[in-house]
Image (cartoon, rainbow, N blue to C red):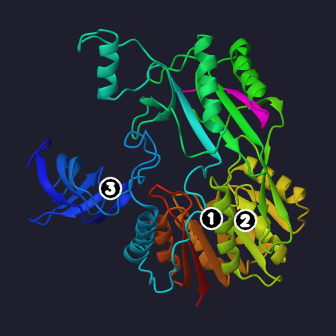
Amino acid sequence: MKKGDILADIVVETMAAEGKCLSRLEEGRVLFIEGAAPGDTVDVQLTRIKSNFLEGKAVAITKFSSHRTDPFCKHFGMCGGCKWQHLNYEQQLQYKQQQVVDNLERIGGVSVKNIRSIIPSADIKHYRNKLDYTFSAQRWLTRDQLEERKAKQALTPDDILPFEPALGYHLPSFFDKVFDVEECFLQPEPSNAIRLLVKKIALENQMEFFDLRKQTGYLRTITLRTASSGEMMVILQVTSDKPEWHEKILQGIADHFPQVTSLNYVINAKRNDTFHDLTIVCWKGLPYITEEMQKPDGSGVLKFRVGPKSFYQTNSKQAYTLYEVAWKMADLKGDELVYDLYTGTGTIASFVAANAKKVVGLEYVKAAIDDAKINASLNGISNTDFYAGDMKDLLNESFLNEHGRPDVIITDPPRAGMHEDVCNMLLQAAPKKIVYVSCNPATQARDLKILSQKYEVVDIQPVDMFPHTTHVENVVSMILR
């Protein structure tokens, strides 16, 4: 077999990693398939050949799976954001649950006898509170779109179309290819309306869209953030200081969308779009929006200030569910010293503080710790302390001696999981209980294997935060043997 060959009538067996499907061929090799669903019968064009596995993409579906449903977005298949739209939601949940089981068993050697059924997301559309759109000087077009435009302009197949700007998303795995988004179902309105207005203003005023290859142009990205309080934030990223352009866009948003309470811009002349090291200018309104979350005991509402650089769980409704799971697993009685590792802006620390004697939050981003202190003060919480530093360096024996040895540790690390030194320090600290919140069951399982030297897993709860994607959150409770 060679690249480009077609394998006909392949029966798709199950889902694999990264949203690909899996089939086993007669000769024993595994075939990973893009663009299919379990239960489909497909023709597959090979794209990669290795000694023990093959990769390919479905080019024809001869029999449709009973698990399929019609994708609701016109950009499905081109956008990498919602790869599982073609699967019904119940089936998505089953595969996410299985993903947790497979990782914990195979990587962590963890018994999953205590696993609970995955908690579905309350909303499966318009659930995100933050989206980033990219400006591009040259819109990426599908083959059909290219042919259609050339036909309209009476061009030959060899003619090159004039550049057409875009405001949308990157194609998966391509830093320089951006397709124009007409409608996105991830964030509630007025998200789409704002994006369309911004593009209209930019085109009418002949503003320069950024060229990702040449690194030229003016408009780079626009970020839209919403809060459950009804407030909204816009962050416009540009390459230089041209008030006559960015003010026209920001004023246009202000005139048409009064719910936008925070209008900001940032000048970024770097080769990447990250702006955590840059100065954000609040052009109008407040430099933050306020997120609200019910207290776990139902006694009131917690408020969290979210700035342009702040991290907040992207699915606000499901964030409450996730934190409630962690809170219940911690089972605090009121006399415990709790360490909240990777505390971010202190959301979990504030969430559990009423049930603890004291909560100590640790985080490597100093700006996040500053936010955490503000959020604690905003909510009248006086039994929290927050410290910034690299976790593997900050959490050591000296820190434990100074601030006390924790009774309970709640840890919510990034996708890479915890550094091995941090895992070993947890073993040394030896709290009675560890609650591990993870957005990546694979790295979580790796860390659990280290912690299993002293700890036993007693509870496992998957939570779906991102419908139509392959991502799944998982919360594990461990007790000291």
Out of 71 and 116, give the one closest to the viewer.
71
The vertical placement of 127 against 27, above or below, is: above
- Residue carrying label 1: 412
The vertical placement of 87 against 103, above or below, is: above
Q: CA distance from mark 2 to mark 1?
A: 9 Å
Residue drawn at (41%, 50%), measured in percent from left and top?
83
Circle 1 Cα neighbour tier, 10 Å, few/some/many (<14 / 14–19 / ≥20): many
- Residue carrying label 2: 348
- Amino acid type indicated by mark 3: Lys
Q: Nearer the viewer, mark 2 or mark 3?
A: 3
In this picture, which residue range is highlighted in magenta?
257-272
* Disc ID at residue 20: 3
**Of pointers 1 and 3, the one earlier in the residue sequence:** 3
Residue drawn at (82%, 64%), measured in percent from left and top?
385
Q: Nearer the viewer, mark 1 or mark 3?
A: 3
Residue 71 horizontal side relative to residue 260, left or right: left
- Element assignment for label 2: helix
Cβ–Cβ below 8 Å for labels 1 and 3?
no
